[in-house]
Image (tube, rainbow, N blue to C red):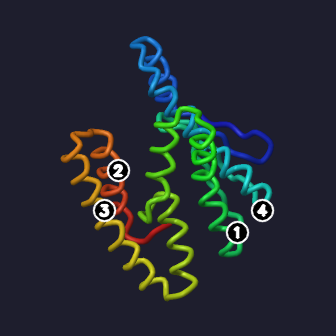
Amino acid sequence: MSFNLFSVRIKFDFSLLLIVSLSLLLDYGSILYLLLFSSLHEAGHIISLLILGGSIDELSLSYYGVGIKHSSYLTPLREIIFYLSGVTVNALLFILGIQREVNFALALINVLPVFPLDGGRALKTILSSLFSLNVSDNVLIAFSIVFVILIITASAVFKNISLLLIALYIAFYLINNKRFV
């Protein structure tokens, strides 16, 4: 389902309702915390984008939380600030002692220099300022592959299925996107 609110396209995926309902029914509060703090992470992006003079084109509410799309032009520095603002929200919540494990995990995963995560997007902005698009994409792909291998290894060592799912998400993204968005 989608609709427009002011000039922003709002997309609502019913999978969010399904995940929240199942979490409540099965008493999996940790999933609800993950959705809540992922949404606050995205709120950090939204607030920084508006402060930096950008505008939101689309908000998506789905099983993974809130996602935003924008087509605003931002200088490289502003773009980096925008990309790292979500991580900053999770880091601040961690420092304040609010659901420390969830916020630490969200900050740590999102700051990795792996595309399409926030750290990877910030690194792409830096690399694109220094090198041609082809060189910056190749360096970013190399970083991403190395980190996918490290995350899979950590998943096996710590017997953590969440890390494996994150690695698979990144791997599928890299395979399906020949050129980064």
Closer to viewer: mark 3 or mark 4: 4
Out of 156 and 127, give the one closest to the viewer. Answer: 156
Residue placed under numbered mark 4 in the picture: 52
Q: Marks 3 and 1: CB-CB under 8 Å? A: no
Task: Point out residue 72 in the picture as x, y percentages from the top left corner.
Answer: 71, 64
Residue placed under numbered mark 2 in the picture: 169
Point out the tag, 2 or 1, that comes first from the N-terminus. Answer: 1
Residue 142 located left or right of residue 59: left
Screen quadrant of the N terminus:
top right
Q: Which residue in the rendered view is the most extreme toward the top?
A: 25
Q: Which residue in the rendered view is the most extreme toward the bottom?
A: 131
Residue type beneath disc 2: Tyr
What residue is drawn where x is 49% and y is 44%? 104
Residue placed under numbered mark 1 in the picture: 78
Out of 69 and 141, give the one closest to the viewer. Answer: 141
Task: Describe the element under mark 3 as helix, strand or loop.
Answer: helix
What residue is drawn where x is 49% and y is 22%? 20
Residue 49 located left or right of residue 146: right
Residue type beneath disc 3: Ile
Q: Marks 1 and 4: CB-CB under 8 Å? A: yes
Give the Cα separation between the discs numbered 2 and 1: 27 Å
Point out the tag, 4 or 2, that comes first from the N-terminus. Answer: 4
Residue placed under numbered mark 3 in the picture: 175
Instruction: State which quadrant residue 143 falls in.
Output: bottom left
Task: Point out residue 110 in the picture as x, y percentages from the top left corner.
Answer: 48, 53
Task: Describe the element under mark 4 as helix, strand or loop.
Answer: loop
Task: Point out residue 179 in the picture as x, y percentages from the top left corner.
Answer: 42, 71
Residue type beneath disc 1: Arg
What residue is drawn where x is 70% and y is 69%? 78
